[in-house]
């Protein structure tokens, strides 16, 4: 049923293990997400491990101190705070007594240690609650045994077990008893109304360290004997290395070695600046290996694909040919987007120390397991040789799903026989990217007797097309004759996931289209969407995972909160609703005209992501997503000439800055449904919301991103940089 | 290599670096103070912002020689225990997402509030315009600066 939240099957087998700590205390191991894993590895012998080998655990010391290890990479989405909050809630301890530590990559004890797809909390929710609740039950059982009463006669609160007679014992006093008990099979989870931690504003667990400049990020990591390395890579996509002269590079003070690996050359030095200078001093000769591509060519190729007939059909309902043949009116529009670099503010970097015994890796990575496996394979080593530690991540946005930079560090360390930290300069980071591919959409709708009878979405993309359930997002299921066709062109420019893959642009295209469609049909923009949603109610199509009921609620809330239709004179609004990453969002942008130019003043954003674990962090994510979406829709442009990116640093690549940021008002719908994604879903609708508001304000439709391609409409102020 | 005498967070430090080494890398690699961040190396993003005699400057575009005889303050030395009003405001508002740019944001904001203790909205936005936050925590950065100003 489309309106239900997804239920994730949960297996208790091999889920929970406990152990006494040598120095007293209890360790509770949780194998998260066992249900997602085809085969659960047999547990290692816990008794044989010393404390330092554990990471996948709640640790409760005899003094009652609780440490919770957060399993997933912290990329700025806040899971290092929110995942432990969920455990602490069910464990029933007070949050201010909890210490949080980052877990390492540990495939025996965790699965899905991934920061991607806005899925950490959605997949972790049930398992994290079970973990906390099981630990709590064991502590209760230990207390009950000591008192000679039934566990059901005991209650817990803030780390203390109390019995009917009013006696109480702290968790710390019970941990050694509890460690010897059987792991209970069935535990009761709290009722949502009894939550004390979940749903409360909770500050980022690393806040103090961040504001005082403590060592936290990959770039900050340091190890004994470590050398710094900068890597020279082919300057153009399509080039390979023919030869190089490293005489001048080696002459740079501090440079210790120059090593070639494949088409790349690493300069090793005692410090970062010397490595950067050495990299610049290399004289390399590059030759064309495959065609050097240019953005204007891509534009022609992608438009050619849209005009052509070579498509793969991802979804087809009814008969669109018939719908268009019988239409009273047809609307067809084309929407165009550029490549986008991720531009994480912490440039790519990784530490590796490859020795005969083991491979030690440290750094910022969204996919530690996949990266470790890739490195083991490339170096022909056992996966067990790898010890990978995750640092805090200075932004990911999808770029750090790819372990290419970690592999480089491992390859260089393997050659140098030294601990090495590979550091990308900003120019390296922007030019050796795995970009959001350039994409064009053509959308066509058929209208007959005042109803939308046909909808045809065509996608032409560089390298790869939309995947998963995206072809089944709204308006799939709402229009009788519906088809999604995709085609791609294989380029040598590397592309991949970028925050909210595909939907980051598709949402703008479709929601701009709906705005124009409503205009052509002479119907209310919001009512058109609500009418279409009626058709989806009660659907038995399991591919349709958005809920028309939940979407209706966010739409109605956005209408109310934004004052849609009742805005004061001179305020022009744009409306968008969207579903992705299992969450439903509606956004309304308010635009005013200042000095003859449209300016975004405010965005009202309504989100249904189920239970909000940490409202303080959630609002930050939602606001950031909206502003990131506006920034890239307005300014994000990344073109290639002969395989070379035209922008290589922030002097040419424009990101949104303080004076361009509107007020963002976020509302979360309150319900008791399991949490869904939040790191991405507020981004895709933002571009459409402002495009629709610009149309209302100026009468002009924007079909291309970035909107700076319309200089006649949008003033491009001088970058006022304080240098 | 030449030797430079620097005063960093009130402490006199001697460094031995090539003369073109940006102060950013002197701090990070030679003095092991990693709170000051590298973002672009060309004074466009603000992640490397420090105070030089109280003024916010981009450490990626200064050399050690340019800082000799002046007082350098980094995020580590903004306060002894993280209790500078701007740091406290950043905590209260819970500004960071990834957190990487925040040291630079805090250094820009703290220098700005010294020169303009009662700023208008437009003045705050102008002052913070040179610092990029890729996570776009801008609304909270603004609120934290305004909060710090209100408490000073």
Image (cartoon, coloured by chain):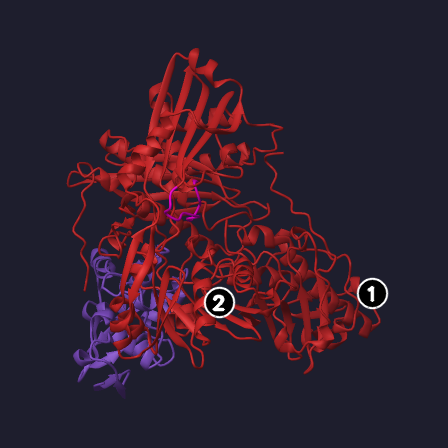
- Do marks 2 and 1 share a subunit? yes
**Earlier residue among tags 2 and 1:** 1
Magenta span main SS: loop
Residue A665 visible here: yes
Name of the residue lying farthest toward the front: A243
Residue tagged by mark 1? Answer: A150
Residue B29, given in percent of the width and then of the height, sits at 33, 78
Label annotation for residue A205: 2
- Magenta residues span A491-502
Classify 10 Å Cα crowding around label 1: few (below 14), some (14-19), many (20 and above). few
Residue A174 spot, x, y in % from top left = 73, 75
Q: Which of the pair A494/A145 is nearer the observer?
A: A494
* CA neighbours of label 2 inside 10 A, class few (<14), some (14 to 19), many (20+): some
Residue sitting at 73 percent across and 77 percent down? A176
Chain name for mark 2: A
Instruction: Give the number of callouts.
Output: 2
């Amino acid at each position: 049923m489309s309106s239900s939240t997804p239920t994730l099957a949960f297996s208790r087998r091999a889920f929970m293990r406990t152990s006494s700590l040598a120095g007293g205390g209890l360790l509770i191991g949780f194998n998260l997400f066992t249900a997602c894993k085809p085969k659960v590895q047999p547990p290692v012998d816990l008794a044989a491990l010393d404390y330092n080998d554990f990471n996948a655990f709640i640790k409760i010391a005899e003094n009652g101190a609780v440490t919770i290890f957060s399993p997933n990479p912290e990329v700025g989405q806040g899971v290092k705070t929110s995942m432990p909050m969920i455990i602490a809630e069910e464990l029933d301890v007070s949050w201010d007594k909890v210490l949080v530590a980052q877990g390492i990559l540990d495939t025996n004890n965790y699965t899905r240690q991934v920061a991607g797809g806005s899925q950490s909390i959605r997949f972790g929710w049930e398992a994290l609650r079970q973990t906390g609740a099981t630990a709590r039950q064991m502590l209760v059982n230990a207390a009950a045994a000591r008192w000679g009463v039934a566990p059901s006669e005991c209650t817990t609160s803030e780390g203390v077990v109390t019995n009917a007679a009013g006696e109480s014992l702290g968790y710390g006093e019970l941990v050694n008893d509890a460690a010897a008990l059987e792991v209970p099979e069935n535990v009761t989870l709290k009722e949502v109304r009894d939550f004390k931690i979940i749903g409360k504003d909770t500050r980022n667990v690393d806040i103090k360290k961040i504001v005082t400049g403590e060592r936290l990020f990959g770039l900050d990591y340091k190890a004994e004997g470590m050398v710094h390395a900068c890597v020279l890579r082919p300057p153009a996509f399509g080039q390979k290395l023919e030869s190089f002269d490293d005489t001048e590079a080696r002459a740079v003070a501090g440079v210790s070695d120059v090593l070639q690996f494949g088409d790349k050359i690493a300069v090793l030095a005692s410090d970062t600046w010397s490595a950067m200078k050495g990299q610049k001093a290399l004289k390399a000769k590059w030759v064309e290996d495959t065609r050097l591509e240019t953005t204007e060519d891509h534009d022609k190729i992608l438009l050619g694909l849209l005009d052509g007939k070579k498509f793969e059909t991802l979804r087809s309902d009814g008969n669109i040919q018939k719908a268009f043949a019988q239409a009273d009116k047809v609307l067809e529009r084309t929407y165009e987007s550029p490549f986008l670099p991720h531009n994480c503010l912490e440039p790519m970097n990784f530490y590796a120390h490859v020795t005969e015994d083991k491979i030690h890796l440290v750094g910022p990575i969204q996919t530690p397991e996949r990266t470790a496996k890739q490195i083991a394979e490339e170096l022909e080593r056992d996966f067990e040789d790898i010890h990978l530690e995750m640092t805090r991540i200075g932004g990911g946005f999808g770029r750090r799903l790819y372990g290419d930079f970690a592999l480089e560090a491992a390859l260089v360390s393997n050659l140098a026989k030294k601990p090495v930290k590979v550091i990308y300069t900003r120019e390296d980071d922007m030019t050796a990217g795995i970009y959001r591919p350039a994409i064009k959409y053509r959308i066509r709708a058929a209208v007959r007797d005042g109803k939308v009878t046909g909808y045809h979405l065509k996608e032409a993309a560089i390298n790869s097309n939309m995947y998963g359930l995206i072809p089944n997002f709204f308006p799939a299921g709402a229009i009788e004759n519906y088809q999604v066709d995709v085609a791609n062109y294989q380029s040598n420019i590397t592309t991949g996931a970028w925050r909210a893959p595909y939907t980051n642009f598709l949402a703008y295209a479709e929601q701009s289209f709906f705005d124009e469609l409503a205009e052509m049909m002479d119907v209310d923009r919001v009512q058109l969407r609500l009418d279409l949603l009626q058709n989806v109610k009660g659907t038995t199509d399991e591919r349709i995972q958005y809920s028309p009921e939940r979407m209706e609620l966010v739409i109605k809330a956005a209408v109310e909160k934004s004052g849609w239709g009742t805005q004061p004179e001179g305020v022009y609004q744009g409306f968008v609703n969207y579903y992705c990453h299992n969450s439903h969002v509606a956004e309304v942008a308010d635009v005013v005209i200042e000095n003859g130019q449209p300016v975004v003043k405010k965005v009202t954003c309504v989100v249904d992501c189920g239970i909000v674990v940490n409202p303080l962090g959630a609002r930050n994510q939602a606001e950031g997503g909206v502003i990131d979406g506006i920034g890239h829709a307005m300014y994000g442009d990344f073109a290639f000439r002969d395989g070379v990116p035209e922008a290589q640093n922030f002097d040419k690549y424009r990101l949104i800055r303080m004076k361009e940021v509107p007020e963002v008002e976020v509302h979360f719908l309150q319900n008791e449904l399991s949490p869904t994604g939040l790191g991405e879903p507020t981004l895709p609708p933002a571009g459409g919301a402002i495009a629709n508001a610009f149309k209302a304000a100026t009468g002009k439709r924007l079909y291309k991103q970035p909107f700076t391609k319309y200089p006649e409409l949008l003033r491009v102020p001088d970058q006022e940089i304080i240098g | 290599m030449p030797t430079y005498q620097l005063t960093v967070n009130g402490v006199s430090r001697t460094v031995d670096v090539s003369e073109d080494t940006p102060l950013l890398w002197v701090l990070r690699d030679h003095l092991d103070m990693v709170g000051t961040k590298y973002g672009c190396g060309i004074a466009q993003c603000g992640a490397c912002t420090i105070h030089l005699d109280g003024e916010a400057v981009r450490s990626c575009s200064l050399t050690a020689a340019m800082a000799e005889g002046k007082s350098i303050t980094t995020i580590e030395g903004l306060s002894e225990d993280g209790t500078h009003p701007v740091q406290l405001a950043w905590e209260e508002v819970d500004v960071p997402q990834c957190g990487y740019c925040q040291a630079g944001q805090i250094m820009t904001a703290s220098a700005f509030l010294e020169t303009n203790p009662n700023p208008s909205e437009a003045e705050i936005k102008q002052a913070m315009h040179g610092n990029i936050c890729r996570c776009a925590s801008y609304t909270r950065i603004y609120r934290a600066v305004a909060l710090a100003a209100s408490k000073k």
